[in-house]
Image (cartoon, rainbow, N blue to C red):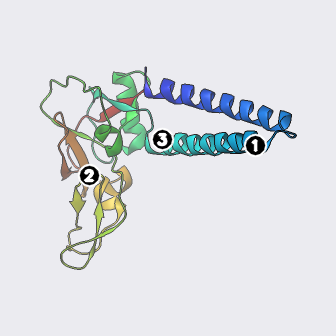
Amino acid sequence: MTRSARRSLALASLAALVLVASGLEVRCDGADAQTRTTIASLQAEIDLLGLRVAMLEASASGFELKGFSTASVRGDGGVLGMTAACAASFAGSRMCTSREVLETTTVPNISVNTEAWVRPNFTPVATGGNANTVALDESGVPTLNSANTNTTAEDMSCRGWTATANQGLVVNRNGSFRLQGCNNNRPVACCGP
């Protein structure tokens, strides 16, 4: 069962539990204290399940790495240009985020020994050894700009996928991440449901 199917099933189950609990509450207005306590306990469990489903939805897009695009794109190709390269290679796919690659459970067979563009997914700003802030991707790749000082997200995404003079995040077929120059044509890491 796919992540999106599991998520849909969980949401449907949660909705059914909420309806049942609401119905019990309405029908049990005159119930004894033990029944009211049981209903309150069930409501608390339903609320907790709802929170867990929301957290799962927030942490997982339901997309996994499907492979690398056949077409290659430079770092200034834009996210939509990179997504178009993915859609042409894998129906319903788009450019991966580093989190989606990290959460992939069905590992595709990628025969080409190359690196592909991947969108960074930033963790909260960390402090570098030189007391300057650094941008840190969830993959663990940090970046410092050319002056070795403060960095921003654009220093890891070819300046928002618009430039060729900077660096962008790439991943290889083994799931190793690093920064590479934006002036080279590379395939795109493609994720889909």
Say few, some or many: other residues with alpha carbon within 10 Å of mark 2 (under 14 / 14 to 19 / 20 or more): many
Image quarter of the C terminus: top left
Query: Residue 10 has which mark?
Result: none
Name the amino acid type tagged 3.
Leu
Q: Is residue 68 left or right of residue 3?
A: left
Name the residue nearer the viewer: 91 or 19. Answer: 19
Query: Residue 36 has which mark?
Result: 1
Name the residue nearer the viewer: 102 or 116. Answer: 102
Name the amino acid type tagged 1.
Arg
Q: Are marks 3 and 1 in contact (CB under 8 Å)?
A: no
Residue beneath disc 3: 56
Name the residue nearer the viewer: 163 or 160. Answer: 160
Residue beneath disc 2: 168
Q: Relative to 104, say whether 131 is above or below.
A: below
Inter-mark Cα distance, 2 to 3 = 28 Å
Residue 112 in view here: yes
Q: In the rendered structure, which disc, 3 or 1, sits on the residue that comes first in sequence?
A: 1
Q: Position of residue 23 (x, y in %)?
A: 79, 32
Image quarter of the N terminus: top left
Choose top left, top right, bottom left or bottom right for residue 49: top right
Name the amino acid type tagged 2.
Gly
Q: Position of residue 131 (x, y in %)?
A: 24, 79
